[in-house]
Image: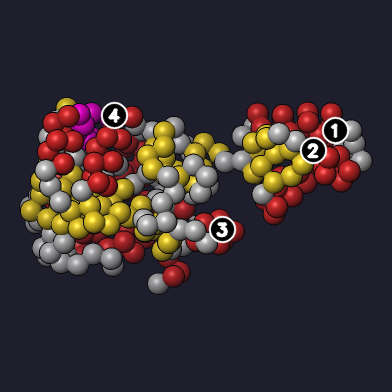
Amino acid sequence: MLAEERYEKILEYLAEKQTVSVNELSEMFSVSTETIRRDLIYLESKGKLKRVFGGAVKGTTLSHYSDFSTRLIENRDKKRELCEYAAELIEDGDILAIDAGSTAAVFAEVLLETFSKLTIITASLDVFERTKGKFSVILSGGEYYEKERSFYGEIATETIARLHADKCFIFPSAVTLEHGVEDYVPLLMPVQKKLMEISGKVLILADSSKYGRRALIKLSPANPEFIYVTDSAIDNRLYREYSEILYIIKGNDK
């Protein structure tokens, strides 16, 4: 058997079993344990799995991180779909804490179309500009981060800390069971955490491309008390695996 064929079969086996041992693979392919170790080293270098003592576990891929203007276009239909499902969990008159990001901009558009009275707390300039004419909006202020069109720093977190929200909506770059909710921008994480702290309920809105992937920094563990909202394109295997632990709402649940 060629090495490429072994790689494919190792990954297929991991997709089903989640873990595998070197000895198990050695017997399966009738090759030496050293050959299998080299295979695992190669597959780990490609981000396909993670080596552990005596074997390997299913790997996760680092999520793609584009600039803000590109992300406004990427997966827009999926973002729109999940935002519409999330809106069903909101009532007129709610106080909402809303994170920044490209999905937040889409979420703001859905809120405008759906509700007549909301109070919004945010550090996002996009959310503020889209909703200020219709809803009561509190913009945190602080230092401005142009790349993400959002405010950060002590002024932002201290302003948010003085408030209360019924529900918080966070838009991360990656979600996994093992590593939790992750994102890319260290400057904005204190603001995200503060929005979560002041809220009675936390909702994680991530399109299906972000599940089973990694980002740079952990924002939160995979908390079963959160509500996770995604679109109907989420991989069925991932959905079954994750929904055993997390409360996930997806498109065809409705």
Q: Of the two numbered discs 4 and 3 on the same chain, state the one appearing first in sequence.
A: 4
Q: What residue is disc 3 on?
A: 241
Please report the residue visible at 42 percent of the width from the left and 61 percent of the height from the top.
Answer: 247
Q: Of the two numbered discs 1 and 4 on the same chain, state the one appearing first in sequence.
A: 1
Residue 125 in the image: state x and y as whole percent. 18, 39
Q: How far apart are the two marked residues, 1 and 4, measured between alpha carbons?
A: 45 Å
Q: Amino acid at mark 1?
A: Thr
Q: Of the two numbered discs 3 and 2 on the same chain, state the one appearing first in sequence.
A: 2
- Span of residues in magenta: 145-153
Residue 58's quadrant in the figure? top right
User: For residue 187, which numbered disc appears in the image?
Assistant: 4
Tell me whether circle 3 and circle 1 mark residues in contact (CB < 8 Å).
no
Residue 1 in the image: state x and y as whole percent. 89, 40
CA neighbours of label 3 inside 10 A, class few (<14), some (14 to 19), many (20+): few
Q: Of the two numbered discs 4 and 2 on the same chain, state the one appearing first in sequence.
A: 2
The answer to whether residue 172 is seen in the rendering is yes
Q: Of the two numbered discs 2 and 1 on the same chain, state the one appearing first in sequence.
A: 2
Residue 75 in the image: state x and y as whole percent. 41, 49
The answer to whether residue 106 is seen in the rendering is no
Residue 214 in the image: state x and y as whole percent. 49, 39
Viewer-nearest residue: 245 or 87: 245
Q: Secondary structure at mark 3?
A: helix
Q: Secondary structure at mark 2?
A: helix
Q: What residue is disc 1 on?
A: 33
Q: Amino acid at mark 3?
A: Glu
Q: How far apart are the two marked residues, 3 and 1, measured between alpha carbons?
A: 30 Å
Please report the residue visible at 31 percent of the width from the left and 61 percent of the height from the top.
Answer: 86
CA neighbours of label 1 inside 10 A, class few (<14), some (14 to 19), many (20+): some
240 in relation to 104, above or below? below
